[in-house]
Every structure is written in structure tokens, then in C-alpha cells.
């Protein structure tokens, strides 16, 4: 069965410092990869996704993630964080299948709480 | 505004009292799904629907029912809630199944005593 591991449950960091949130998945087949962000008392919002092509994907607010097939990783990075980035971040994976086998299911990691301190 | 709405947002109930959590989307999406979020476990899929009248089980369907009579609505039904169903529930929708982006509702926090 597919699984996603987010290696850190909490990541405290000071404002303007760089951050990396780690994500590893278990799959030997082609996958789609996603990062979602959940701000307090809100639903999840898509931050960025990897479907195919360039292994480096970027979001509009400065985050980036790199798909590493050999290490089955999809770590999220930001060179300089802001207080407003404080949130819970979820890595998710879905196996690429076509037709009736495509259930649309996202398999989520346990989540990483990013705490940005002033 | 394109959105997924859920009601109620908060609910405290007792064991065995049937309840329904509604989910509605205004984006004409074919695909809808329910997840539950528990600390340390992330989100797990309960049920999903590829289109009207087409539903199927996710990873944790026990104790839940769903229906999809209209494209915009996908209610989650707990016929006889139990304390282990205390959780945060999210409804999501997308144009079609993956890789299309899933849009999430604001969540429903359910407590079963």
C-alpha cells in the first residue's frame, strides 16, 4: 500500500530564515505529488503539485519542491519565511492510473506544523 | 465565488443519534470526496463519487454512508455515530478525478460523546 511520511511533526523557525519540510513516499510506480497548506480553522489549499516534466515546481508565494525519483522524496523549501507562513503543511501522493482505476484518492502524510517566530 | 461549503461547521452529538453533514459545491465538479483528519494520521478518504449516482468506498468507510443524487451535493451520513468517529471532516471536489486539483471545504468538527 502507498504511504507518505513527513519526517517532522513540527518545525519551528525564525522569520526570514530558510526552511525545508521533508516528505518521502513509498511507491515504485509513477505518482502525482502535492503539497497542501492548512491555515488555522480553514480547509486545505493546494500549494503546489508535480504531475510530470520539470522536477522542480514552484508556488506563487515563494515555496518550491523538488521531485526526486531515486530517493522517492518531494521536499518543500522556502528560502525566507514570513510570519504568515505559519500553518500546517501536508504532503500527498496519488498513483498515476487511467480509466476506471483512477479513484482520485490522495494519500496524505501526517502533516508538519510550521511555526514561524518573530 | 467558487467554493465548497459544509454544514454544520461544529457538531456535538451523542452515541447512536443519526446525523448528516452536508457538502455542496458550485463549480459543476464531477468528482467529490470525503476525508477525515485525525492527529498524527493526516487525512484519510472515507468515500468518493465520480459523478451523480456513482459512489465508492475509500480507505475508512465503516460507519458512514453517502449519496450523490445531484451533482452539487454529497452528504455524509452517520447512521449510528460512535465516539471513534469524533474527528474533523473535510469534503473536497474537483473537475474530475486526479490529477485535477481538489478544492476543500472549511471542515466540520464532530464530537460524539
Image (spheres, grey):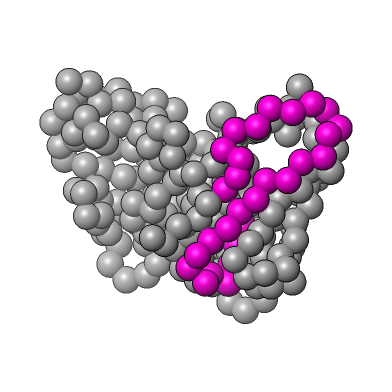
Q: From where the camera sits, is residue A80 visible?
A: yes
Q: Where on the picture, by quarter, is residue B108? A: top right
Where the C terminus of chain A falls, by quadrant?
A: top left
Q: From where the camera sits, is residue A105 visible?
A: no
Q: Position of residue A34 (x, y in %)?
A: 42, 54
Work out whether residue A8 or residue B54 is closer to the camera in this orientation and state it: B54
At x 43%, y 39%, the residue is: A42
Q: Position of residue B74 (x, y in %)?
A: 66, 59
Q: Position of residue B78 (x, y in %)?
A: 78, 43
Q: Position of residue B8 (x, y in %)?
A: 61, 40
At x 71%, y 50%, the residue is: B76
> Is B41 positioned to the left or the right of A34 in the image?
right
Work out whether residue A48 or residue A22 is closer to the camera in this orientation and state it: A48
Query: Is residue A29 depicted above or below B61 in this figure?
Result: below
Query: Is residue B53 depicted above or below A71 in this figure?
Result: below
Query: Is residue A67 depicted above or below B95 in this figure?
Result: above
> Is B110 positioned to the left or the right of A118 in the image?
right
B88 drawn magenta: no
Amino acid at each position: 500500500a502507498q504511504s507518505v511520511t513527513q519526517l517532522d511533526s513540527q518545525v519551528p523557525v525564525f522569520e526570514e530564515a530558510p526552511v525545508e519540510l521533508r516528505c518521502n513516499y513509498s511507491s515504485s510506480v509513477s505518482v502525482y505529488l502535492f503539497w497542501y497548506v492548512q491555515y488555522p480553522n480553514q480547509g486545505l489549499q493546494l500549494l503546489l503539485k508535480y504531475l510530470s516534466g520539470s522536477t522542480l515546481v514552484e508556488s506563487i508565494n515563494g515555496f518550491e519542491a523538488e521531485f526526486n525519483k531515486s530517493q522517492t522524496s518531494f521536499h518543500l523549501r522556502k528560502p525566507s519565511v514570513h510570519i504568515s507562513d505559519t500553518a500546517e503543511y501536508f504532503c500527498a501522493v496519488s498513483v498515476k492510473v487511467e480509466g476506471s482505476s483512477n479513484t482520485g484518492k490522495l494519500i496524505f502524510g501526517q502533516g508538519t506544523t510550521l511555526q514561524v517566530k518573530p | 465565488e467558487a467554493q465548497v461549503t459544509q454544514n454544520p461547521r461544529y457538531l456535538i452529538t451523542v452515541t447512536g443519534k443519526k446525523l448528516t453533514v452536508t457538502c455542496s459545491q458550485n463549480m459543476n465538479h464531477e468528482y467529490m470526496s470525503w476525508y477525515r483528519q485525525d492527529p498524527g494520521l493526516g487525512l484519510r478518504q472515507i468515500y468518493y463519487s465520480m459523478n451523480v449516482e456513482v459512489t465508492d468506498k475509500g480507505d475508512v468507510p465503516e460507519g458512514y454512508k453517502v449519496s450523490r443524487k445531484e451533482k452539487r451535493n454529497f452528504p455524509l451520513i452517520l447512521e449510528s455515530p460512535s465516539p471513534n468517529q469524533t474527528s474533523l471532516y473535510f469534503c473536497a471536489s474537483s473537475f474530475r478525478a486526479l490529477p485535477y486539483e481538489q478544492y476543500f471545504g472549511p471542515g466540520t468538527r464532530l464530537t460524539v460523546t
